[in-house]
Amino acid sequence: MSLLGIDIGTTGCKAVVFSENGTIDSLAYREYDIQRPKPRQAELDAASVWGLILEVIQEAVQQSGGTSIQGISATSMGENMVPVSEDRHILGPSILNVDHRGEEFIPSLEQHIPNIRLHEINGNVWGNQYSLPKLMWIRQYQPELYERTYKFLHWASFATFMLGSEPCIDYSLANRSLLFDINREGWSDPLLELSGIDRDKLPRPVPSGTAVGQLGRQQAEYLGLKPGIPLVSGAHDQCANALGCGVVKDHMAMYGMGTFPTIAPVFTVTPDRDVLIRNGLNIEHHAVPGKFVSFLFHMGGSTVKWYRDNLARDVAESARSAGTSAYPMLYEQMPEHPAPVLVLPRFAPMGPPDYEDDPFGSILGMSIETGRGSILKGLIEGNTLALQLLVEQLPKAGIDIREFRAVGGGSRNDRALQIAVDILGKPFTRSPITEAGALGAALLAGIGAGIYRDAEDAAQAISHGDGEFFEPDQRRHRHYQEVFGIYKETRNLLKPISQKWNDLRKTLEQQ
């Protein structure tokens, strides 16, 4: 008996077949690029990505035999949606959360529903990274596409819909639209009315782990599977990551080290909203019923890929020719001591506390003696320093993290993980689960297929083994505390300069 988990990310997708105790039977992965049709725009070619998703499913099924798969579910990045027709045709690209389209609507939205009221309804504060501004932009500037669209679907619900399910969405992904009422667990009447988005353009919200249909005959034949396999609602990728690595109880937090470095603490009691709002922090349904999470995140993890492709192309090409990953070789080039450069990882739009939209990445302390390994280490340090801004605020909100579990590609390297441990000054357990997001989706598939009773039963059924334990080096932690002080000071000093620079850049682009 096995389960298929599909993990759809911003720059890559994978399909993994797991046994019911969490052992990987097969895995397939494809990478893709973000399209940038105009300055300040970012989207995915939805048709091309869907083709790659089908490829990874086919490959994983072929490797495993596919005959024992009892359930299928998907997890995906949040916010980004795909317009589809009722007969399952893709009608346009998927505008990404880092795209600036729709930002003109935010001031008016906030004027009518202030952040405190939005947070009470939806658990978020206004920001252009969510689905709502993109939907409003499509309705205003691409009215024909808006009218032709049957449903706008987040990627996980899109995947199951294309495989044959009803158009449904789990609560965690629905939350990323800014149109979801977390208390009523349905679409919000006030937010729909304010935005002008039609309710019938959105899928039906359901809890994670709900059976929403069966694999269609045509899709099954194409993929080499039997028709009728249960299709199950998944979860926002960070929630699936947390479930996959066993972060299901209060006082636990996941640290996902990927394209979007993310810390996700779990809690039951609603934290202090004033503190959350001041710091731009959200409340979202976990994949575990009755539990909620908040996300401390940014897109700084993409800087490591940028470094690989631009500053270490020779290593990347050598690794590609050898059929291996370039990252272990690149990490070996990092110095043992903390980096001699200070990096503010605003190379792409950032998350809380300020949700800075315009890139203004900065590397300070460069000299002609700076090696590229020092730059890489500075990038990795900067990713955790940016999250530390929020970690230090959590106790004020009543969120007490006692246990970190690290997952994601960056966590597989001892040196990269130790940097985070030393900066935060708390012990980490590295989850032995290498594909926590896909596993979380597979566990939800098992719940919907009746293999597990619920999320906690599913997490207990997985053989997590003894994860590796990492203790902070107190000497380096003290050093990083000093670095963090300078990081905050530098960040504040550069804010007005970044605004002037980006205003000038926009003016020059328009000339």
Image (cartoon, rainbow, N blue to C red):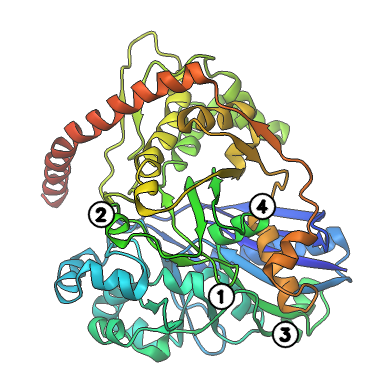
Foreground of the two, 22 or 24: 22
Q: Residues within 10 Å of mark 1 (few under 14, many from 20)?
A: many
Q: Residue under circle 3?
A: 216
Residue at the limit of the structure toward the top, as seen here: 369
N-terminal of the two: label 3 or label 1? Answer: 1
Mark 3 residue type: Gly
Asked if residue 52 lies left or right of residue 499, the reply is right
The residue lying at 41 percent from left, 23 percent from top is: 480
Q: Position of residue 412 (x, y in %)?
A: 65, 36
Q: Residue under circle 1?
A: 157
Give the total of numbered labels. Answer: 4
Q: Is residue 264 above or below residue 180?
A: above
Q: Position of residue 266 (x, y in %)?
A: 52, 57
Q: Position of residue 470 (x, y in %)?
A: 63, 30
Foreground of the two, 285 or 260: 285
The residue lying at 66 percent from left, 30 percent from top is: 319
Q: Secondary structure at mark 4?
A: loop
The residue lying at 24 percent from left, 79 percent from top is: 140
State the image quarter where residue 346 is shown: top left
Q: Secondary structure at mark 2?
A: helix
Asked if residue 6 lies left or right of residue 152, the reply is right
Asked if residue 101 lies left or right of residue 408, the reply is left
Badges 2 and 4: C-beta atoms under 8 Å apart? no
Q: Residue under circle 4?
A: 245
